[in-house]
Amino acid sequence: MRSEVGIMSRRGFIVAGATAGTASAAALLLPGRTSGLAALGRIDGVADVRLKPAPAAAPLMGSGKPDVQVWAYNGQVPGPEIRVRQGDRLRVVVDNGLDEETTIHWHGVRVPNAMDGVPHLTQDPIRPGGKFTYEFVLKDAGTYWYHPHHRSFEQVGRGLYAPLIVEEHQPIQVDRDVTWVLDDWRMDSSGQISGGFGSRHDATMAGRVGNTVTVNGRPPQPLAVQSGERIRLRLINAANARIFGLNFGGHRPQIIAIDGQPVRPHEPNGPVVIGPAMRVDLILDAMGSPGNRVEITDDFYTGGLEYVLTDIVYSDVPLRKAPLSTPIQLPPNPLPKPQLRGAPRHELIFAGGMMGMMGGGGMMRGGMMGGGIMGGGGMMGWTVNGVSANGHDHEPMLTIQRGRTAVMNLRNETAWWHPIHVHGHSFRVISRNGKPTQHKEWQDTVLMPPQESAEIAFVADNPGDWMIHCHILEHQAAGMTAAFRVT
C-alpha cells in the first residue's frame, strides 16, 4: 500500500496543522486542519506561504480545559506544517504580529546565509508590524522545523515553532507518514504558561524543563494502529531543554534518518534519544496482536522521573499478517563528503554554568562575563573557548576557506548535557570520545553528555558567518554560542 504522502504531485505542497497520530497527507488536508494559514499559491515548483507570529489561545491542555495564552504562527501550536518536495523553492512572507522583534530560522535546512534568520548576524530582526520574505531552494529531503532565533528562549518557549517536511522524489513505501512535534511546558497552578523566562536557575543549570508534555500541541493521544501496518514516524524535539528517551515497549523501530539526513537503518541501542532541536525518523512496523495495547515510555530521566508518554493501541482488524518487505533505506542527500586527510582541525571547548568546576572549564572561567540572558553581568555564563558571547552579532571565532573540509573536536567540559547545533551545514559525526562512530551519521545537532567529546567534519561550502551554539535555548542566551566564517 503506497503512502498517501508519496503520491503527491511533483510540484505539489501541503501546509497544514499536524494532529497526534493521524498525520497522513490526506488527513492534513481535511477541513479545519489548515485554519490560520494563508497560502499564496504555487507556480512551477515555487510554494508561497504566509506566516504571522502573534499572541493566540491554544488548547494545550486538551478539550474541556481552558485555552492557554501562547505565541503562535497563524494562531496554532505547532504552527502550520509546511510540506514540500525536494528541489522545490519555498517563499515565506512573515508578518510580525508580536510586540517585539522576531525572525525565523529554518533549522537544519542548508539555506543561503541571508535566509538563516539570525538577528543582526544574517538579517535585521523583523520589527513589530514589519514584514520579511524568506526564499530558498530545498536541496535536501528530510524532517526539519522552523522557529525564531530572536529571544528564542521565550519565543519558542511560548509556542513559536512548526515542522518543515521535505519529501523525497521517490518516498519509501509506508502506510502512514506521521509527524510528532514533542514539547514540554512549564505551567502554573492556573493552567497558564509560567513566567520567569530567562531565570538564573534555568540559564546556569539544565535549562527551562517543563512540567507538562505535549505531542503536536495537545496532551498525547494514543497512536491507533492495525497489526501489520508500517508507519514512518517523524519525531521533532521542539522543547527548550527537555531531552526525550522514548521506549516503544517491545516494538523494534528502525532509525532511518537523524536530523533529516538518511542513515543506514538500524535499531536504537536502548531508548530513542532526541535532544532539543533534533529529529529522528523511525520505521515502526506494528506487529502486535489485534486488540493489544502497548505503552510508549520516556525513560531518559531516571530516579522516578520516568513516565508513560502515550499508548500504541491496536484495532481488532489486522491490516496484514507480515511486515512489508520493501526497502526502508532512504536515498542520500547531495551532501559533499568530507576529506579528512590534511583538513584543518579546530577544538571548541564548551564550559561554564553551575557546577562548572566539575568539568575543568570552571564557573570562574566563563562566569561573570556579562553574556547572560538578561543582558547584563552577574550571571555564571557559559563559554566557548573561554568566551561567553553576548547576543548574536560577534566576531567569528574561526575562519574556514570555502570548499575546504573542517574538522571540529567538540569538548563538553561541563556538568550538563548540551545539544550543539551548527548553522548552514550538515556534518558527519566521525567519533565520540576518540572512538569511531558506527554509522558516521550526518547531523546538524549533536547531543553531548557531560565530560564527553565528539569529532565532527563537514565541507564548508556555504559562504557567510554561521552560528554554532547549544540548543538548550537558555544556555545559548547565557553565552554558549560562537560564530565561524566561510570565505
Image (cartoon, helix red, strand yellow):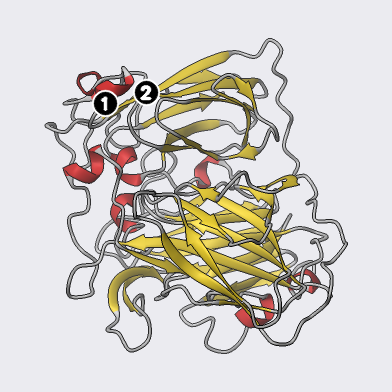
Image quarter of residue 417: top left
Q: Horizontally, is 311 left or right of 476 in the view?
A: right
Q: Is residue 457 above or below residue 304?
A: above
Question: Which residue, as the protein is rendered here, is positioned at the far right?
Answer: 325
Residue in the image at 81% along x and 65% along y: 173
Residue in the image at 38% along x and 51% along y: 242
Image quarter of residue 283: bottom right
Q: Horizontally, is 270 left or right of 197 in the view?
A: right
Q: According to the image, label 1 marks what residue?
A: 356
Asked whether residue 79 is in view, the answer is no
Residue 13 position in % (x across, y down): 68, 70
What's the distance in space between the residues labelled 2 and 1, CA to CA? 8 Å
Residue 352 position in % (x across, y down): 28, 26
In the image, what residue type sits under mark 1?
Gly
Q: How many marks?
A: 2
Quadrant for the C terminus, please: top right
Q: Is residue 284 above or below residue 292?
A: above
The label on residue 413 is 2
Of 139 and 283, nearer the camera is 283
Near mark 2 (Cα within 10 A), the count class, few <14, some 14-19 or many ≥20, is many
Q: Are marks 2 and 1 in contact (CB under 8 Å)?
A: yes
Residue 270 position in % (x across, y down): 58, 47
Residue 274 position in % (x across, y down): 51, 49
Element assignment for label 2: loop
Residue in the image at 40% along x and 30% along y: 450
In the image, what residue type sits under mark 2?
Glu
